Amino acid sequence: MMSWMEQRKRAGRRRKLARALLGVAGLCTTTFAVGTLLPVEHRTTVRGSLDRPPEAVWRVLTDLEGMPMWRSDVTRVERLPDADGRTTWREVSRTGDVIVELAESVPPYRLVMQHLEAGRPVLPELSFRLAAAGSGTSLTMVAREEVGNPLGRVLVRLGARASPAARLLRDLESRLNVDRRRVAGGGVQGDGH
């Protein structure tokens, strides 16, 4: 038989557990409510400085066949017929396939890549602005994406989810640095491909 003190302690632990569960449920509900008030479209801007001229960076960004060699999110690229005169391709990754078109191209300064669904442009969209900066390039990438889940909207704005633009910039920096080391080490001379 349980003593009176043991019963009080057990009841106290149950009350603390109930309060904690209510607190977690309240936090989730509040976060969800805040997320529903945030816009579905999210825009992320990342900037970087690359130790290559804009023309070399441009060639890497527009080399469809070379994308799987440096982009961590792409395993294969398949060139598709042009859509209304714009270059179109399929990017294959571990999470599925997407159709992408080159929506705008002003070599070597502005590039816009946009996803297509049923032949129509949809988000996400990724735009690149390249500017000469000494002997290198100043790069600004803007990723526009749709975040349907209200909890995801809050997490994106808090920075808890990595931006596709930030990942792409890291991949690009890595690709260009690998080629720079290869050239400096007396390996194959190249322009970034």
Image (cartoon, rainbow, N blue to C red):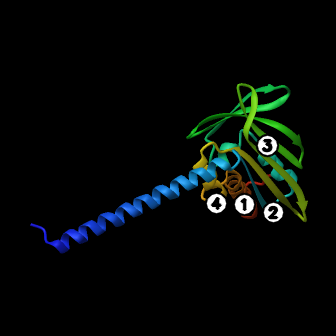
Decide if residue 190 is on the left or right side of residue 117: right
Quick one: label 2 or label 3, which is nearer the N terminus?
Answer: 2
Quick one: label 2 or label 1, which is nearer the N terminus?
Answer: 2
**Residue occupying image coordinates x 65% and y 45%:** 147
**Whole-percent x, y for residue 109 in the image:** 89, 49
Quick one: label 3 or label 1, which is nearer the N terminus?
Answer: 3
Callout 2–callout 1 Cβ contact below 8 Å: yes
Considering the image in quadrants, where does the N terminus appear? Answer: bottom left
Quick one: label 4 or label 2, which is nearer the N terminus?
Answer: 2
Residue closer to the observer: 81 or 4: 4
Callout 3–callout 4 Cβ contact below 8 Å: no
Label 3: which residue?
62
Q: Which mark is residue 177?
A: 1
Q: Residues within 10 Å of mark 3 (few under 14, many from 20)?
A: some
**Residue occupying image coordinates x 71% and y 25%:** 118
Quick one: label 1 or label 4, which is nearer the N terminus?
Answer: 4
Front of the two marks 1 and 4: 4
Specify whether residue 29 is in view: yes
Front of the two marks 3 and 4: 4
| Mark pair 4, 2: CA separation | 31 Å
| Mark pair 3, 1: CA separation | 18 Å
Amino acid at dot 2: Asp
Label 2: which residue?
51
**Whole-percent x, y for residue 47 in the image:** 78, 60
**Whole-percent x, y for residue 174 in the image:** 69, 58
Q: Residues within 10 Å of mark 1 (few under 14, many from 20)?
A: some
| Mark pair 3, 4: CA separation | 32 Å
**Whole-percent x, y for residue 36 in the image:** 63, 47
Amino acid at dot 3: Thr
| Mark pair 2, 1: CA separation | 8 Å
